[in-house]
Image (cartoon, rainbow, N blue to C red):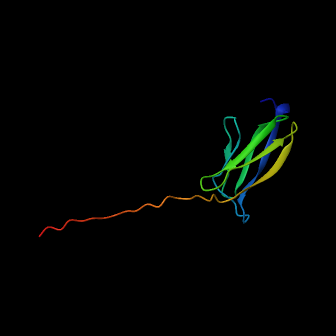
Amino acid sequence: MQSQQRAELYGRVVDTKGQPIELANVAVVGKAGGTVTDINGSFLMPVRALDTLIVAASLVGYEKQQDTLILKAGEKRSHIFVLKVAATMLETTVIEDKSARST
């Protein structure tokens, strides 16, 4: 990627209480690569400038958040993703234990 076509997206991924989410995936949808947040929920990744980018943040147990961004060449933009805990319904599982007695 030529430097004049590059931009930089950085920021944080947090939960609805503002707590950082470590190891969340942040990537441009439909493109290879991406990055992972650090212990502070922070990320940094180069992106192609002047393209309409759909950037997604996700982590198992949370709902994925996607935002559409356009960055200018050379721009460094901060962005915060707020992930909500995923509400999942689990099926009821019954576990039975039968033991046989011998006399």
Expressed as whole percent of the image width and height from the top left, the position of residue 79 reads 80, 51
Q: Residue at x 70, y 49 (%)?
A: 57
Q: Residue at x 14, y 67 (%)?
A: 102
**Above or below for 26 versus 41:** above
Determine the residue located farthest toward the top in the rendered image: 2
Q: Residue at x 85, y 40 (%)?
A: 71
Residue in the foreground of this view, choosing between 60 and 92: 92
**Above or below for 36 versus 88:** above
Q: Tell me where residue 46 sits by quadrant.
A: top right
Expressed as whole percent of the image width and height from the top left, the position of residue 40 reads 69, 58
Expressed as whole percent of the image width and height from the top left, the position of residue 56 reads 71, 46
Q: Residue at x 70, y 64 (%)?
A: 19
Residue in the foreground of this view, choosing between 91 and 32: 91
Q: Is 28 on the left or on the right of 72, as rendered? A: left
Determine the residue located farthest toward the bottom in the rendered image: 103
Residue in the foreground of this view, choosing between 15 and 38: 15
- What quarter of the picture does the C terminus occupy? bottom left
Q: Is 50 on the left or on the right of 14, as rendered? A: right
* Count of numbered marks: 0
Determine the residue located farthest toward the left in the rendered image: 103
Expressed as whole percent of the image width and height from the top left, the position of residue 78 reads 82, 50
- What quarter of the picture does the N terminus occupy? top right
Q: Is 84 on the left or on the right of 49, as rendered? A: left
